[in-house]
Image: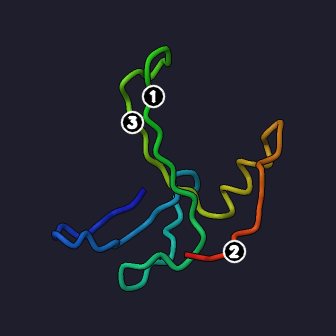
């Protein structure tokens, strides 16, 4: 869950992992550790039709979740880090 300062610049103030509740490190509006952020819009034929969900996972919780997948995540090496 991301929290921003209520200004036009939308400065990032806090990121909290939705799974474990830990606050991730944020300095001067910049996230300083690994975080998985997701937004999913459910459409027709789903039980959540018309609902949009947002969540964030710290790197440890992300690892815990993907370890439970029946098929492993596809992984590749990034040539440039953003």
State the residue at coordinates (50%, 18%). Answer: 46
Which percent across, then down, holds residue 50?
36, 25
* Mark nearer the viewer, 3 or 2: 2
Which percent across, then down, holds residue 29?
36, 79
Which percent across, then down, holds residue 8?
16, 69
User: Mark 1 highlights which residue?
Assistant: 42
Marks 3 and 2, the one that precedes in the sequence: 3
Does 63 sit left or right of 11 as displayed?
right
- Using a 10 Å C-alpha cutoff, classify the residue at mark 1 as few (fewer than 14 neighbours), some (14 to 19) or many (20 or more): some
Does 38 sit left or right of 29 as displayed?
right
Q: CA distance from mark 2 to mark 1?
A: 32 Å
State the residue at coordinates (51%, 56%). Answer: 37
State the residue at coordinates (69%, 74%). Answer: 79
Quadrant of the image for the C terminus?
bottom right
Which label number is shown at residue 52?
Answer: 3
The answer to whether 40 is drawn above or below residue 14 in the figure is: above
Q: Quadrant of residue 53?
A: top left
Residue at the front extreme?
79
The answer to whether 11 is drawn above or below residue 63 in the figure is: below
Marks 2 and 1, the one that precedes in the sequence: 1
The scheme the figure's colours follow is: rainbow
User: Mark 2 highlights which residue?
Assistant: 79
Marks 1 and 3, the one that precedes in the sequence: 1
State the residue at coordinates (65%, 64%). Answer: 59
Asked if labels 2 and 3 touch by Cβ distance under 8 angstroms, the answer is no
Asked if labels 1 and 2 touch by Cβ distance under 8 angstroms, the answer is no
Per the image, label 3 sits on a secondary structure element best described as strand
Asked if labels 3 and 1 touch by Cβ distance under 8 angstroms, the answer is yes
Per the image, label 2 sits on a secondary structure element best described as loop
Q: CA distance from mark 3 to mark 2?
A: 32 Å
């Amino acid at each position: 869950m991301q929290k921003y300062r209520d200004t036009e610049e939308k400065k990032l103030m806090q990121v909290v992992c939705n799974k474990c509740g830990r606050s991730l490190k944020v300095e001067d509006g910049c996230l300083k550790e690994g975080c998985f952020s997701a937004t999913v819009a459910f459409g027709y034929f789903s039980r959540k039709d018309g609902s949009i969900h947002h969540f964030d996972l710290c790197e440890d919780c992300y690892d815990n979740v993907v370890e439970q997948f029946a098929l492993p995540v596809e992984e590749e090496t990034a040539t440039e880090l953003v």
